[in-house]
Image: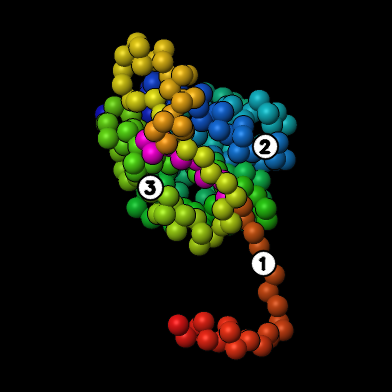
Amino acid sequence: MEISASTIHSFYNSELGKIVKLETANNLTHALNEHQARKICGLGYTYPYLEFLKESYSQAFFHEMSPDFLGGIMKKNSSFKQEIVDEYCLPIEPSSIDIVVFSHILELVERPETVIEEAWRVLKPNGLLISIVPRRAGLWTRYDNNPFGYGRSFSKKQLTYLLNQFFYLDGSSYYLYTPPWKNFFNYKLSPFVEKIGPITVPFLSGLKMQVSKKIVYTKSNTKIKKSNLQRNLATI
């Protein structure tokens, strides 16, 4: 399957896609933990997750942005602002968004660090970036019957390195232990597998959700004299 908005949409309507939606929704609930938000944006293919968040943030403004390389946007919900964008130059004012959700974006773009920098630009101070990425060690990246089998995958160190340049890492979770196999028994056993997966095979989770917070540090005009210890460490 080729990656496009329509193929990702079809995947989420499949039995495997429904499992991904359910487990991601559960992790989103835990990650946000009643975080207050008035403006929420999604970049990539985020419709299923914005739709879920709409239930908890019914008064919030939602903006669903699809990068032009995905070839379009699935216009299904008139309560969302839906737009095709240049992922490296988002049409949003600086420091105006409370939550940004990344899904099907960091693994597909040529310059993920630029996309992350754009999220930092549009987020308010203490705003949250929720990054959903395929995990390198997981099973889902080894099959091309799902969108996570395309593009790059991330180890813990790689994702941390990218996000640490702009954000304070505020929490993370690993999930999706159900194998990406299309059969009835796999679908039925999925709830049980998701419960025992973190205990029995923690290294095989398919996805990682990283919560990052935008922290703005104030600049000081006062020069601080370095201690001898600081000067010595700088030379090591």
Instruction: Kindly identify which numbered label has been placed on residue 154.
Output: 3
The secondary structure making up most of the magenta span is strand
Residue at left offset 59%, top offset 27%: 52
- Is 45 situated left or right of 171 in this image? left
Q: Nearer the viewer, residue 199 or 98?
A: 199
Q: Within 10 Å of the Cα at label 1, are there few (<14), some (14-19), or many (20+) other Cα atoms?
A: few
> Which label's residue is closer to the chain start, 3 or 2?
2
SS type, badge 1:
loop
Q: Nearer the viewer, residue 56 or 208?
A: 208
> Which label's residue is closer to the chain start, 3 or 1?
3
Residue bounds of the magenta highlight? 203-212
- Quarter of the N terminus within the rendering: top left
Q: Within 10 Å of the Cα at label 2, are there few (<14), some (14-19), or many (20+) other Cα atoms?
A: few
Instruction: Kindly identify which numbered label has been placed on residue 217.
Output: 1
- The residue under label 2 is 33
Residue at left offset 39%, top offset 33%: 201
Cα gap from disc 1 to disc 2, whole angstroms: 24 Å
SS type, badge 2:
loop
SS type, badge 3:
loop
Amino acid type at image mark 1: Tyr
- Is 156 situated left or right of 26 in this image? left
- Is 35 situated left or right of 137 in this image? right
Q: Is residue 21 visible?
A: no
